Amino acid sequence: MDWRITTFTELTRDELYDVLSLRNQVFVVEQRCAYLDVDGRDKASRHVMAHEDGRLLAYCRFLPPEESCPDWTIWRVVVAPSARGRGLGHDLMRRAIAAIQQAGGTSIHLSGQAHLRAFYESHGFTVVSAPYGERIPHLSMRWTEGDAGVGRFYAGGSQSPCDG
Ligand SMILES: CC(C)(COP(=O)(O)OP(=O)(O)OC[C@H]1O[C@@H](n2cnc3c(N)ncnc32)[C@H](O)[C@@H]1OP(=O)(O)O)[C@@H](O)C(=O)NCCC(=O)NCCS
């Protein structure tokens, strides 16, 4: 397995095409969700990729804190359908968290599909919101360095400002 973490400008054209293909194949087609996957955040993100025999099998991106969100954020966690159940999802999360820590990050937010709560909890994330989203329920989840398990519950249990 060939793992690589890049900035947007370091992505080759082929890599960018494969990333957008996989995200669309899974989040738009497989999960039947018509939404704007190309959301303007890719240029400021780092991109975590695993290739095997030239095929992109696992991907996520992460972003440093923004004005609207004090935490680092992890988005678009995805493993190709043919490669699921091999531990790539866990490896992807470990690598993204380690890269954020290496960059000095001490808190991470993600918006996780509710049925994957245990998966994210196994990486130290804690639920900090009530479920939200109609078709696919989501949970705001938060990770803090050295204090895994202690999250902030957003006012009224609503979704976090980082979910935008
Ligand atoms: C979620 C996903 C990334 C997991 O990748 P994977 O490589 O299959 O996961 P792993 O083999 O590393 O296993 C991860 C764990 O999550 C669990 N898991 C995987 N898919 C699951 C599902 N649909 N529902 C509940 N748990 C699930 C596995 O059982 C495993 O649990 P374990 O460690 O207790 O055995 C992958 O299924 C995927 O890409 N799903 C579609 C995209 C998606 O919904 N992404 C999440 C956005 S929030």
Image: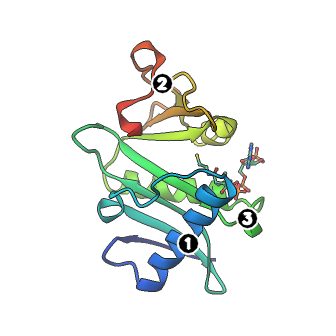
Q: Is mark 3 within 8 Å of ligand 1?
A: yes
Quick check: 33 above or below 139?
Answer: below
SS label for mark 2: loop
Q: How many residues crowd around disc 1 within 10 Å: few (fewer than 14), some, or many (20 or more)? A: few
Q: CA distance from mark 3 to mark 2?
A: 33 Å
Type of amino acid at the residue the image marks with label 1: Ser
The residue that disc 1 covers is 21
Percent of width and height locating residue 134: 60, 32
State the scheme by which the image is colored: rainbow
The disc, 2 or 1, on the residue closer to the chain's N-terminal end is 1
Disc nearest the viewer among 3 and 2: 3
Q: How many residues crowd around disc 2 within 10 Å: few (fewer than 14), some, or many (20 or more)? A: some
Q: Where, by quadrant of the figure, is residue 88 drawn?
A: bottom right
Type of amino acid at the residue the image marks with label 2: Val
Q: CA distance from mark 2 to mark 1?
A: 36 Å
The residue that disc 2 covers is 150
Which residue is pictured at 48% across the width and 24% down the height? 150
The residue that disc 3 covers is 81
Q: Quadrant of the C terminus?
A: top left
Q: Where, by quadrant of the figure, is residue 122 drawn?
A: top right
- The reply, left or right, for residue 9 in relation to residue 139 is left
The disc, 1 or 3, on the residue closer to the chain's N-terminal end is 1
Percent of width and height locating residue 21: 56, 72
- The reply, left or right, for residue 50 in relation to residue 110 is right
Quick check: 131 above or below 54?
Answer: above
Of residue 5 and residue 84, the one placed in the foreground of this image is 84
**Residue positioned most to the front:** 34
